[in-house]
């Protein structure tokens, strides 16, 4: 695997920063940043910034959604929520609700 790749942000080369300036005097350009390859599980492996990642997602959102379309909601099993009453300043009551996920591993079937 190459040690660096070009940032995949479609607008990376348009952002005005001194580190993007390349070329010789009289023919300078803003160039797409190089991104160091370090963690294939992270988008930072292909994008120099959150902004460039967002630019990519916004430009290619229709294609991205086709990778894993969702036609049904997902659900996570939980215990019945536990509501607890508390007393705050001046005796004012307030409530908190505890939501606990049910461990899927031990509840298969
Ligand atoms: Zn970039």
Image: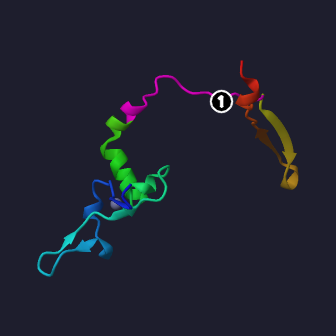
Helix, strand or loop for the magenta stretch, by majority? loop
* Quadrant into which the N terminus falls: bottom left
Residue, disc 1: 76
Ligand 1 positioned in quadrant: bottom left
Q: Residue 99 appears at what percent x and percent y?
A: 75, 36
Q: In this rendering, does residue 78 appear at all?
A: no
**Looking at the rendering, which quadrant does residue 26 occupy?**
bottom left
Start and end of the magenta stretch? 65-79
Front one among 93 and 49: 49
Residue occupying the point 30% across, 76% down = 18
Among all residues in the image, which is located at the extreme front? Answer: 1
Residue 77 in the image, given as x and y percentages of width and height: 69, 27
Q: Which residue: 73% across, 34% down?
A: 101
The image shows residue 52, relative to residue 59, as above or below, that is: below
Give the left or right position of residue 105, taking residue 54 as reference. Answer: right
For the question of whether residue 82 can be seen, the reply is yes
Q: Quick one: label 1, few (<14), some, or many (20+) residues within 10 Å?
A: few
Which quadrant does the C terminus fall into?
A: top right
Residue lying farthest to the top in this orientation: 109
Residue 93 lies left or right of residue 74; in this view the side is right
Give the percent coordinates (x, y) of residue 51: 39, 57
């Amino acid at each position: 695997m190459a040690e660096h790749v070009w940032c995949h942000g479609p607008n990376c080369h348009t952002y005005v920063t001194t580190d993007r300036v390349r070329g010789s005097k009289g023919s300078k350009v803003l160039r797409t940043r190089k991104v160091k390859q370090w963690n294939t599980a992270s988008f930072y492996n292909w994008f120099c910034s959150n902004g460039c990642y967002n630019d990519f997602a916004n430009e290619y959102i229709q294609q991205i959604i086709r990778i894993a379309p969702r036609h049904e909601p997902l659900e996570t099993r939980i215990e019945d929520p536990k509501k607890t009453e508390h007393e705050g300043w001046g005796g004012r009551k307030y409530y908190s609700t505890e939501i606990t996920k049910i461990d899927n591993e031990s509840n298969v079937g």
